[in-house]
Amino acid sequence: MKRRPEVWFIGIVAAALVLFFLFGYLLNIYEADISVTKRSLYADGQSETVIEVVPLNSFGSRTPFRTLNARFEIKEGAELIEVTEQNEEKGYLRLRAKSGTGRVVIRVSPGMAILPSEVVIFIYPNAA
């Protein structure tokens, strides 16, 4: 009967350590990574790419249950692409190439970053 409070105390301390580990290392955002599905598109009116801001935890993997807002600004080549879907709260941008060729520069400003990053997408002529 006397050992029962000691077992409860050890269980509570172990649970507190697990919660501290989960919040401090797994659920906390340490870095923002910019993911691009395709960096080169074809000028066929159907090629698409998705630019997404991915929140990373301390282990370098995607932070579960968290999203990171981002601002997207097309600096160069706006006439070459069509924005099909944009969600700044969830941090992604879906683009479709039009019929022109060239280079598209998009400035991405993640919510937790100090400086913005630029993503360059090349649009090549459709050879087929």
Image (spheres, helix red, strand yellow):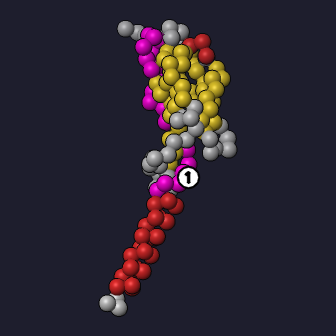
Three-letter code, disc 1: Tyr
| Rendered-image quadrant of the C terminus | top left
Outermost residue, front side: 1
The magenta segment: 25-48
Q: Please tell me whether residue 22 is drawn above or below residue 105 in the rendered image.
A: below
Q: What residue lies at 45% left-to-right and 20% top-to-bottom?
A: 48
Q: Where does residue 110 sit, x and y in percent of width and height?
A: 60, 39
Residue 20, x across and y down, in percent:
49, 65
Query: Measured from the top left, where is residue 10 in percent x and y?
Result: 40, 79
Reading the image, the residue beneath label 1 is 30
Residue 30 inside the magenta-drawn segment:
yes
Circle 1 crowding by C-alpha within 10 Å: few under 14, some 14–19, many from 20:
some
Task: Report the label total.
Answer: 1
Residue 121 visible in the shown view: yes
Determine the image quadrant of residue 3.
bottom left
| Observer-nearest of 19 and 80 | 19
View extreme (left): residue: 1
Q: Nearer the viewer, residue 75 or 8?
A: 8
Which residue corresponds to the image point at 58% horizontal and 21% vertical from the top-left?
Answer: 104
Tell me the residue at 55%/44% (across/down): 32
Asked if 7 appears above or below 56 in the picture, the reply is below
Residue projecting furthest to the right? 114
Badge 1 marks a residue whose secondary structure is loop
